[in-house]
Amino acid sequence: MNKLRYAGVATMLGDGRVLIDGGVVLPDIDASEIYDPATASFALAGAGVYGNGDSPVNAALLTNGKVLEILGPGPSCTDDNCDDSHDAVLYDPLASTFTATGSSTSMRVLIDGYDTATTLLPDGTVLIAGSGLGELFDPVSNAFRSSMPMVTVRSGHTATLLADGTVLVAGGQDAGGLVAGITAEIYQPAVLTPAPGLFSLSGDGRGQGAIWNPQTGQIASTDSPAVAGDVLSMYATSLFDGGVVPPRVAVGGRLAEILFFGDAPGYPGYSQVNFRLPNGVAVGPAVSVLLTYLGRPSNEVTIGLR
C-alpha cells in the first residue's frame, strides 16, 4: 500500500479492483487507493471531498458501478469542527473522482457511521440502517429519503440481503450496550424482488440447464458436452436493468470469466449472460452452474462437461 492506514473501508468495484478509503491514514487523512489484482499493485485513487474531520465509515457498490461512501466522524473530528454540509460522497471509478452527494433526511447521528450498516437492495437503492433509524439512498436522484424506523436502536450490527429481497438486521448494541446483541429484525422493501433465476430444460429450475454454445446452438449437455475455454450463453431473471456490475458465475465451484451481460434480445425482463468456462473444473455429465448477483445466489443448474 502507498499509505499507512487502519480502520478503513474496502469496496470491490465492478471490474474486480478494490477501492480502499477512510480510517486513519498517515501521513495524511485524505488519501484513497485502488488495489488492482491483475497487477498486484496499489495506486492513488484521487482526492476525496470530505468535510473537516469527516471520514468514510461504510460504503456500498451501486449498480451503476459507482461507490456510495457514508461519512462519519473521522479521527480528527470533534463536536466543534465536524462538517455537516454533506453526508455522503460518490466515487466514480471511470473518472477516478469523488463528488459530494445528498444530505441525510434524519438526524446526523444516523450516519455518524459506526452506528450504521449499508445494504444494496435489488432495486438499486441503498438501505442505511442504524441508531433506530432507516434511510434509503436513491442513486437516480442522488438523494436520501426516510424509511421505516427500526424496531430496536442498535449499533455495530450487520445488515444482510436475503434471497427473498428482505434484509436481516442482526446483533450489535442497543442504547444501553446490551440487548440488541441477541436480537434481530427484518427490513421489508415496498416491493420484493426475487433472487436471480436460471432456466432448466425441465422448467423447474433444476437439473440440465438451458445453457448453450452460441456458435453451434447446442445445449451443453451429456450429448454435446462443453470443454474448458468454451463460451456459453444463458438467460437469467432478476438482474438489474441497465446495471454495470456484472454477476458472478461459478462452474463446478470455479469462477468463470463474464464476457457479456445485458438485456436478452426479444425477451423483455430477461437478461443474457455470456461466460467462458474456466480451466480446472472436474468433468462430468452434471457439473453445477450457479449465478450470484448483488450477493444473492440463483438456483443451481447443471451442464455436461468433458
Image (spheres, helix red, strand yellow):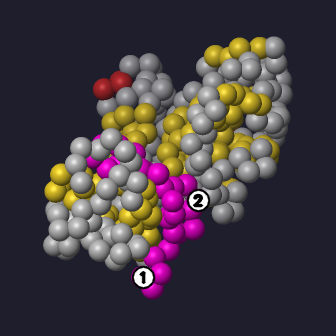
Residue 229 position in % (x across, y down): 40, 54
Q: Amino acid at mark 2?
A: Val
Task: Quote the CA–CA distance across marks 1 and 2.
Answer: 19 Å
Which residue occupies the extreme bottom position in the image?
266
Residue at the spot 81% in from the left edge and 36% down from the top edge: 46
Q: Label 1, on which residue?
A: 267
Residue 296 position in % (x across, y down): 37, 51
Category of crowding for the residue at label 2, using alpha-carbon neighbours closer than 10 angstroms: few (below 14), some (14–19), many (at least 20): some
Please name whichever residue, 165 or 151, is drawn nearer the observer in this view of the structure. 165
Residue 78 position in % (x across, y down): 77, 19
Is residue 72 rendered to the left or right of residue 212?
right
Residue 178 position in % (x across, y down): 38, 19
Please name whichever residue, 57 or 63, is drawn nearer the observer in this view of the structure. 63
Q: Label 2, on which residue?
A: 244
The answer to whether marks 1 and 2 mark residues whose Cβ atoms lie closer than 8 Å is no
Does the image show residue 172? yes
Residue at the spot 17% in from the left edge and 68% down from the top edge: 223
Tell which circle, 1 or 2, labels the residue nearer the N-terminal end. 2
Q: Residue 255 magenta-drawn? A: yes
Give, as a single range, the part of the protein colored magenta. Answer: 240-267
Mark 2: secondary structure: loop
Q: Amino acid at mark 1?
A: Tyr
Residue at the spot 36% in from the left edge and 69% down from the top edge: 213
